[in-house]
Image (cartoon, helix red, strand yellow):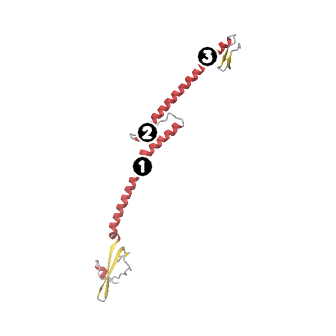
Amino acid sequence: GSVIAHKDPSFVLKGMRFNLPERDGLHTGITGRRVVLTISDITLGSRKLYIVTERALFDAFGFTLRIMAVIGILFVIAFAGVISFALLVRKQIVTPIEALANSAAVISGGDLSRRAELTADNELGVLAGSFNAMADQLTSKITDLNQHVKDLEASRAQLRGISQEFHALLDAIPDVLFLVSPDLKILWANKGA
């Protein structure tokens, strides 16, 4: 149809024609740009006139696009917050627990000199301190036990020497000597027997 009114009078004066789309929506406007078109008709006598309004895409959807941009920014901020929180949890909880577990594995493998290197002022720090104290006590007990074993071996060697001297003395006696159990079994006899 012919354009009979427009905000730019040159469209009317040029006798411009415009093909109406079948329904409202996104279309190419009278200026050749993509626009949002709405069409209404009115009847004046025997003539049917169409009122076509067009609005540039950004003007029509500007508010929606700004809301979507704000939502996108908020999503990025929330995602960054979640990632930051995950990294903080990893640094503050997971990494110290892994270090403590690694120290425990090394100690259980026999390296009693290993200690948990965690000085945090929280529950994990207390756990690491208790772990280190336990490792110190274990090291001390093992050292004491090793010393007792050495002392026992020295005592056993000394007792063996005394026993050999005693047997040599008893064997040197020309008389018959023997040791009898309560049920009269001979447990030991010297060489003179």
Q: Quadrant of the C terminus?
A: top right
Q: Is residue 119 left or right of residue 11?
A: right
Report x, y in % for residue 125.
Answer: 41, 39
The secondary element bearing badge 3 is classed as helix
Of mark 3 and mark 2, the one earlier in the sequence is 2
Q: CA distance from mark 3 to mark 1?
A: 70 Å
Q: Is residue 104 above or below residue 191?
A: below
The secondary element bearing badge 1 is classed as helix
Report x, y in % for residue 153.
Answer: 58, 23
Q: Nearer the viewer, residue 3 or 126?
A: 126
Q: Amino acid at mark 2?
A: Leu
Q: Which residue is mark 1?
A: 87
Q: Residues within 10 Å of mark 2 (few under 14, many from 20)?
A: some
Spot the residue most to the front.
183
Q: Which label is found at residue 127?
A: 2
Q: Is residue 123 above or below residue 173?
A: below
Contact between labelled residues 1 and 3, with CB atoms less than 8 Å apart: no
Q: Amino acid at mark 1?
A: Leu
Q: CA distance from mark 2 to mark 1?
A: 22 Å
Q: Which label is found at residue 133?
A: none
Q: CA distance from mark 3 to mark 2?
A: 52 Å
Res 132 quadrant in image = top left
